[in-house]
């Protein structure tokens, strides 16, 4: 078991991201944005500079937090699929250089206004995600699907159907403890109904999980411009993400993978951010609190 995190929530630049990682005593970062540009889109000279600084600091990238097929990608737009393929192709080359074997991906923006089980949507999404997973399989990389505002995030049953239809050994899951709190359960029909339960979602997909994002919070109602539920994000164990129960069950089951913190308390990737100092301090405090939570579970 190891700790890591979306260090772009600590600092925009790689120097600050490395500093926060080292202050926590960690040795790796789940890399998403550097200077507000995703790692797969950085100019080549900037990417080489980042690689050099990571090597000098003894810090590695354990996972690429990509934008591939994410919540901003419309499954009905071929140009969005082409962009995701190009992003993934660039990422795979860079992952080889960094000896990184996992990339976070998604299953295109959730179609909340369409039927919960829409054969037209599935006939478009499944082949596209299958293509992305095959690219990863050919490169010896795991495509880790996150339960976010995407097809697979509409319920655990949607995730299971996605797994069944992708049918690749390199298609696995990164489970985010906080995302079910912010998504409706569409498994029962077309009405939005009730919000998901994180532990129920986790329990039903547990066997396919290779990696875990730690986020916690409480929905406050309404959605933002990107379709995300408005929420109060909280320290791990203080919200409705059932973080302690999920982590305890994982550890009791012999889980030996990564726990990646994604606080969202001061910096929200798709929203506004606080001051640089506030972001940095919150990230470090979040990491410390999560490590204490894990130690308490182990006692």
Image (spheres, grey):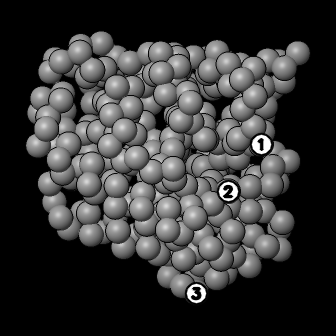
Q: Which residue ends up furthest to the top in the rendered image?
A: 194
Alpha-carbon span between mark 1 and mark 3: 30 Å
Q: Residue at x 63, y 26 (%)?
A: 235
Q: Which residue ends up furthest to the bottom in the rendered image?
A: 45
Front disc: 1 or 3: 1
Q: Which residue is mark 3?
A: 45
Toward the viewer: 243 or 220? 243
Toward the viewer: 77 or 220? 77
Q: Is residue 263 above or below residue 245?
A: below
- State which quadrant residue 207 falls in: top right
Q: Dividing the image into 4 quarters, which one contains the C terminus?
A: top right
| Residue 186 percent across, percent down from the top left | 25, 22
| Residue 133 percent across, percent down from the top left | 42, 57
Label 1 Cα neighbours within 10 Å, binned few <14 / some 14-19 / many ≥20: few
Alpha-carbon span between mark 2 and mark 1: 10 Å
Front disc: 3 or 2: 2
Callouts 2 and 1 close, C-beta under 8 Å = yes
Q: Which residue is mark 2?
A: 62
Mark 1 or mark 3, which has the lower sequence index? 1
Callouts 3 and 2 close, C-beta under 8 Å = no
Q: Which residue is mark 1?
A: 2
Mark 3 or mark 2, which has the lower sequence index? 3
Toward the viewer: 28 or 146? 146
């Amino acid at each position: 078991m190891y700790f890591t995190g979306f260090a772009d929530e600590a600092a925009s630049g790689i120097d600050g991201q490395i500093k926060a990682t080292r202050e926590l005593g960690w040795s790796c970062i789940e890399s998403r944005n550097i200077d507000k540009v995703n790692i797969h889109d950085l100019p080549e000279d900037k990417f080489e500079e980042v690689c050099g600084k990571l090597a000098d600091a003894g810090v590695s990238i354990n996972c690429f937090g990509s934008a591939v097929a994410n919540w901003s990608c419309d499954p009905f737009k071929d140009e969005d699929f082409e962009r995701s393929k190009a992003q993934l192709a660039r990422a795979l080359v860079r992952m080889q250089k960094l000896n990184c074997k996992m990339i976070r991906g998604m299953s295109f923006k959730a179609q909340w206004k369409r039927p919960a089980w829409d054969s037209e949507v599935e006939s478009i999404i499944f082949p596209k995600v299958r293509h992305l997973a095959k690219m990863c399989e050919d490169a010896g990389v795991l495509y880790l699907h996150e339960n976010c505002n995407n097809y697979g995030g509409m319920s655990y049953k949607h995730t299971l159907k996605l797994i069944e239809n992708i049918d690749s050994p390199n298609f696995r899951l990164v489970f985010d403890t906080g995302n079910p709190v912010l998504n409706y359960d569409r498994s029962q029909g077309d009405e939005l109904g009730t919000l998901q339960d994180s532990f129920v979602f986790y329990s039903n997909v547990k066997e396919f999980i290779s990696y875990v994002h730690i986020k916690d919070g409480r929905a406050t109602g309404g959605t933002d411009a990107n379709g995300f539920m408005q929420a109060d994000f909280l320290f791990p164990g203080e919200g409705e993400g059932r973080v302690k129960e999920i982590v305890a069950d994982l550890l009791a089951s012999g889980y030996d993978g990564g726990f990646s913190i994604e606080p969202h308390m001061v910096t929200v990737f798709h929203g506004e951010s606080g001051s640089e100092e506030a972001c940095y301090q919150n990230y470090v405090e979040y990491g410390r609190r999560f490590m204490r939570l894990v130690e308490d579970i182990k006692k």
